[in-house]
Image (spheres, grey):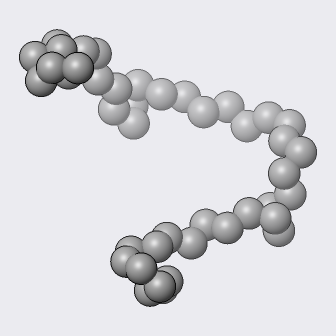
Amino acid sequence: MQLADLLSAEALTFDDVLLVPGYAEVLPAETDLGTRLQGGFKP
């Protein structure tokens, strides 16, 4: 993909997207919201 293709594509911002909560089989206790910044460093 060329840069011109990326620049001409439609972009969305947080205002343009509506997330609707729904049923999920994943329990909150089974999730990991951690972020790896570098190698073995985990805040």
- Looking at the image, which residue is at 54% across and 28% down? 18
The image quarter containing residue 4 is: top left
- Looking at the image, which residue is at 67% across and 67% down? 32
- Looking at the image, which residue is at 39% across and 31% down? 15
The image quarter containing residue 13 is: top left
Query: Would you place residue 10 above or below residue 35 in this image?
Result: above
Query: Would you place residue 25 above or below residue 16 in this image?
Result: below
Q: In this view, does 24 lie to the left or right of 1?
A: right
The image quarter containing residue 24 is: top right
- Looking at the image, which residue is at 29% across and 23% down? 11
Query: Would you place residue 41 above or below residue 30 in this image?
Result: below
Residue 23 coordinates in the image, percent (x, y): 86, 37
Name the residue nearer the viewer: 3 or 27: 3
Q: In this view, does 11 lie to the left or right of 14?
A: left
Query: Would you place residue 31 above or below residue 5 in this image?
Result: below
Residue 35 coordinates in the image, percent (x, y): 49, 70
Residue 42 coordinates in the image, percent (x, y): 49, 83
Quarter of the figure with the N terminus = top left
